[in-house]
Amino acid sequence: MPALDDVEWEACLLEPVRNAPVERALRKALGTVPPGLRYFLDSAWWMDAAVALDLVHIPLLHLDPNLAEMVALVVSQDSACRYCFNMTRGVLGILGFSEARTRQLEELSTELDVTERAALQFARRVSRATPLVDAAEAAPLRALGWSDAAVKELVALTAVNVFFNRAATLPALPYEDATRLFESPLMRLAAPLLRRFVRARRARQPVPLTAAEREGPFAPFVNTLDGLPVAPRVRIAIDACLRGSSLGRRATALVFAVVGRGMGCPVSEGEATRLLLADGMPAADVDAALAHFTAPSLTPLERAAAALARDAIWPQPARLQRQARDVQPLFTRTQFVDLIGTAALANLVCRLSAAMALDA
């Protein structure tokens, strides 16, 4: 599927907001307020996670920055996210990718370098995750000389892209905005100056996790990335979500558990189930909630959150967006924004199981 023009996409469910303190913090951390984040500025934890996981600011220890952008295109295409697809295409143009080169990436053409093609095929499998990726699927990359650490960085980069794709797809962020942004005359004039701001950074040495960063919910997923600069950033995002979501800890854990069950990821489901039990949900209700999204102790909000999270794993965009619009009145605006972020983060975490498989 070389383009997404035929993918149905609903009207955006959210309006962009202004939040001066958060915007100042984003400019300080990222140098700008990314256009897509303006729809989520009323969630403090969401901004903490978005800064930690910003793809330009995560230093890459093993991957080439150009490959990182190629991965972003492949993931957005696989996810059928029109917003991220258009944004990534625009960034590739700033970086000097020709239209012909971009088309080769979209089609995973045999004209691509053999290493690039193997990496992008693997990234597509991690993104799709049907079923979850096992260690044997990394064999083509290992045969090309990739270390396990390099494969894990590719897994993590793919998973972070899935996070942003789900976050854009659920509320139907307006992909036309991305098209207009990159087609503007000002953007074309500024492209040479912008290249250094949109290219991922390189890391010079491993970044070991601290003892504190190795602890906490979903630690196995973070710890498998130990040494990669992305690892502490994933820890920040998970902790921010569990600590600060307006959904409450139980509904947040339920979303993680539903995505873990739906993706067939027993480690993620187990981690989330422990949180649910610790928060007082009866064991019988946990099983019913994960199987049928219903249980005596579940609130209407929790039932809606669970069902929406399940459909966000492998979304049909317009169908998911219509479902989100139907349940949106059950939530405050901040709760709805937090649900979008939580479902996106749960998808990221489960896809990191591909990195854990390399340790088995």
Image: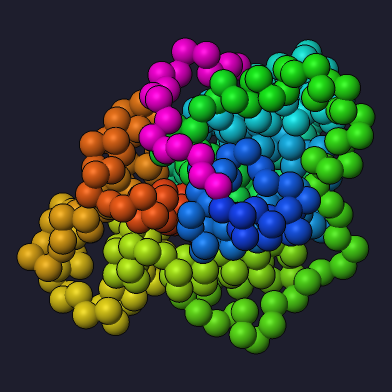
167 or 359: nearer the eye? 167
Residue 96 in magenta stretch: no
Which x, y percent locates residue 60? 79, 55
Q: Seen in the image, is 252 located left or right of residue 57?
A: left
When asked about the image quadrant of residue 59, the answer is bottom right
| Viewer-side residue, 197 vs 109 | 197
Question: Where residue 317 sits: x, y (%)?
Answer: 40, 29
Depth check: give the residue in front, 155 or 244.
244
Instruction: Please give the name of the residue rendered at 45% of the width and 37% of the height, measured from the top-left corner.
Output: 15
> Residue 340 at what x, y percent from top left?
41, 49
Q: Which residues are magenta?
A: 1-18
Left or right for 164, reference 304:
right
Q: Quadrant of the N terminus?
A: top right
Q: Residue at x 28, y 43 (%)?
A: 328
Q: At which x and y percent is residue 114?
A: 79, 31
Q: Quadrant of the C terminus?
A: bottom right
Q: Is residue 221 visible?
A: no
At x 42%, y 50%, the residue is 337
- In the image, residue 65 sits, relative to residue 316, either above or below, namely below
Q: Is residue 11 visible?
A: yes
In the rendered image, the vertical position of residue 2 relative to residue 344, given as above or below: above
Dominant secondary structure (helix, strand or loop) of the stretch shown in magenta? loop
